[in-house]
Amino acid sequence: EAYLVRAQWLTQSEADFRKGLELDPSNGPGLTRFGEFLTGRSAEGRAMLDRALLVDPLSARAYYLRSNLAETEAEAEQLLVAALKIDPQFTSVLKQLSWLRAFQGKFAEGVMLAERAIAADPKNPSSRWRQSAYNRYLELGDLAAARDVIAESSAAGLAPFQLFQYLGDWRAAGEAVYDVPERLRSFYNDWLAAEAVRDLALHTGDVPRAIRFIESGGLGLPEPRKLDPVSIYVAVPLAHLLQAKGQGPESGKLLDDALAWVNRKRDPAREYLLWFPLRRVRADALALQGHRDAAVAELAEAFRSGPRNDWWYTIERDPLWASMRSDPRFQAIAAEARAHAAAQRALLEEMRRRGEVPYRPPQR
């Protein structure tokens, strides 16, 4: 036990983890912590977390950590659902499953899960589950509910730049991202943040500021051009900025690298978050490269198969698609996306009537 405690809190030493588990091979928490330590070596991390679950099949945390190493969306979903059965108030699991439901286009259920997380942690004004809740409400077109979630947050926490994007206020959206406190800057707190600073730069012409911000770690990414399951979502906005600055070769290389990364055969032995969706990244990259037909076809397939999260930004706001919004093929994608969101909004109202989701703002 002493070796495992030292490994977790002091040394972060693989040798200490292994020594501790050699002395106590059935230490479930120790196996779970070592599995988390091995996340960057996915095959080993999976094996260690599977071993932890054999020792302690009621470890919600082990199921949650194992979901990050799942090879498919279905496997991730199964593991997250298993974790919630053990601990229905596990906020990180509720948040993760809320995102997954948004990827699947199940926005109403995504709201329900995020609201459950808020109810379990009501005093946290800057939580990622609050951001998931108001993003899901925007996907449902429920602006009043999104504003109500934000009203419960402090200025030191949640930055409502997605709300400004939704309203078409590109200046407020971009400046809100720049104003996020450094301690809260991370990709997972900043969906669409790269797009917000990109859009501000394209309107004002201050492209160098946006590039400096992204490349200096402003989004919580120390090396945004080093592609991984997180930075890949920033690659196209950054390439767009480089193109706008006149750095065509650099922009082209980043786009080529991004498409190669998206199209590669993924390696389950080394990679994590394998179930995060990438088709929209491919569509955006193709659009920026000027491959109009391929981009629209890829976007249509992305919406058919998922992901659908933040659909309104692509359909209504993203400058990458501005020249294609009059294209009948794009208009068909937009019509289907709006119809899908409307059906989900109707489901949300049913869930509210059943008491599964709170009314926002509260009914008087």
Image: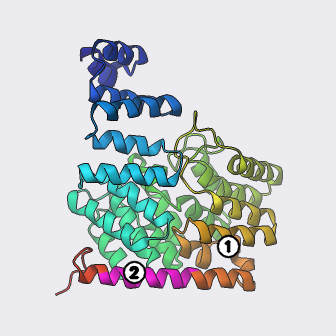
Query: Which residue sits at x=63%, y=67%?
Result: 302
Location of the N terminus by quadrant is top left
Magenta span includes 23: no
Q: Is residue 128 above or below residue 316?
A: above
Query: Which residue sits at x=52%, y=46%?
Result: 273
Tell me if residue 181 can be seen: no
Q: Residues within 10 Å of mark 1 (few under 14, many from 20)?
A: many
Q: How is the image coloured?
A: rainbow
Which is the main secondary structure of the residues drawn in magenta? helix
Q: Where are the magenta residues, as a range? A: 337-350
Residue, disc 1: 300
Q: Is residue 51 above or below residue 261?
A: above
Location of the C terminus by quadrant is bottom left
Helix, strand or loop at mark 2 = helix
Question: As shown in the figure, which amino acid type bears the numbered disc 1?
Answer: Ala
Measuring from the top left, give residue 324's x and y in whole percent: 74, 79
Helix, strand or loop at mark 1 = helix
Is 25 placed left or right of 289 in the picture? left
Residue, disc 2: 143
Question: As shown in the figure, which amino acid type bears the numbered disc 2?
Answer: Leu
Query: Which residue sits at x=37%, y=81%?
Result: 347
